[in-house]
Amino acid sequence: MTRRWTMGPEWIAILALVALFVVGTVLPINMGALAYVAAWLVGMYSLGLDEKEILAGISADLVLTLIGVTYLFAIARQNGTVDLIVRTAVASVGGRVALIPWVMFAVTAVITAIGAASPAACAIIGPIALGFAGRYGISPLMMGMFVVHGAQAGGFSPISIYGTITNSVMEDAGLGASHLTIFFSSLAVNTVMAAILFVVLGGRKLMRLRMDADGELVEAGAATGSATAAGGSETRVHPDRSDARSATGATPTTGTPNPGDAGTRLEHTLTLLAFLAVAVVALVFEKNIGFAAITAAVVLSILTPKAYKDTVKQIAWPTVLLVAGVSTYATILTTAGSPEFVGNWAAGLGAAAIGALILCYVGGVVSAFASSTALLPVIIPIAIPLVAEGGLSAGFFVAALAVSSTIVDVSPFSTNGALMLANKPDTIDENTYYKQILGYATIVTLVGPLLVWVALVLPGW
């Protein structure tokens, strides 16, 4: 009697994910809307879930973070506070434009290394960093990805959220902790990726640029390579910053007061205090950054209601739909058992190194659409048979899994990538910027786990 093979829900969920990704890439349809359709159909007719159970998978925390942060920074752009931050930060690096991306990388890394959640760090630093990009002609893709890679560079310190989760899961699984191995692996990989982005996306050109006292870009003369004060020549470079644009590239509202006005200074002060309050509440007291940001935005709006009555329209609603839909479908994937199915299959292969590579790709692909924090506790225990029977180093193998599962957070479907998309400079078209981030995320997802595996697992450290 011939045995009939039936497609299980884990395969249906995987195929639906591939289908929505293909359709969303080929056609100009918001992938979040497609993900909602896929979640509804797969959830109801393959998993037997009702609509309430399907909707329970939405990441309300992520959605609120996007709404709150983009609302608060819309206010900051409108009243010129981000413009002020841009000028101050440029002065702090001595006008060296090439240092700006690295300053943002380092600051974000420090924030996550001391215990901040990666999305919280990106939410705080990302809009400011992209303000620099819009003001000084720096590639928005480079600047946004520097922030994300910075967050992941520091994200596995022994006192960080990722580091604590990863090492705790290792200890619970009997693998022992590898605090420094995992931390320095993530730091090294993300720093190398940032360096590659810097070179490919125009960093060498930025090294020739300086800011003068008037905020103008100045390029040192090629003949002498020195500034005019040393007897050389210089060329004044004018970025795209017409009088109708602020330092972030945003078009200010009609009637914006002069930066020297007392009223404007008060608005700047209040907005900066709001930023500080949000950072303290989110990072020190570990409260939800979405609640903190939207509360700060509402307070500022109450203080000056007429000035910000239309600011809510500037919330990145297309990005909210994108992330809400995809996060809902990610829960469908987990419910269907797709990650465990692929992971267990990889662990059952004869060659331990090949199984490790497959698990790195499982972590990378799934995390590009889902929460890295939620994935790590799931995928690390799956690796135990490979460590026990394949003779692999637990520290370096888990480091490879951890890095593969987090470098893909540059994806526009992840919280960090979505925050970079939501806070794009107005100098770049949203669809163009989305395709740039998606293209880079695709390269990282396809190539990143392989290179991490080659560096950390294949040598058999």
Image: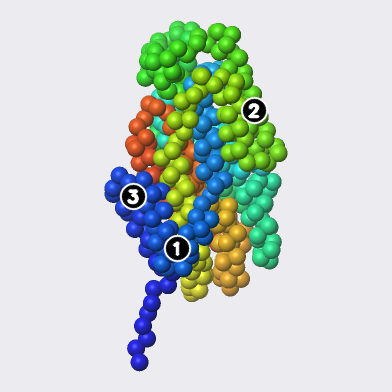
The x, y position of residue 142, in whole percent, is 44, 35
Q: Residue at x 66, y 29 (%)?
A: 277
The residue where tag 1 is placed is 43
| Above or below, 216 relative to 310 | above
The residue where tag 3 is placed is 24
Query: From where the camera sits, is residue 20 visible?
Result: yes
Label 3 crowd bin: few (<14), some (14–19), many (20+), radius 10 Å = some
Q: Residue at x 60, y 59 (%)?
A: 377
The image's mark for residue 103 is: none
Q: Residue at x 33, y 50 (%)?
A: 24
Nearest-to-viewer mark from 3 and 1: 1
Q: Which badge, 3 or 1, is on the more N-terminal residue?
A: 3
For marks 3 and 1, give the CA distance. Answer: 20 Å
The x, y position of residue 187, in whole percent, is 57, 44
State left or right for residue 194 relative to residue 2.
right
The x, y position of residue 107, in whole percent, is 59, 33
The residue where tag 2 is placed is 276
Return the residue nearer the eye: 348 or 325.
325
Query: From where the camera sits, is residue 192 visible?
Result: no
For marks 2 and 1, give the CA distance. Answer: 42 Å
Callout 3: SS:
helix
Callout 1: SS:
helix
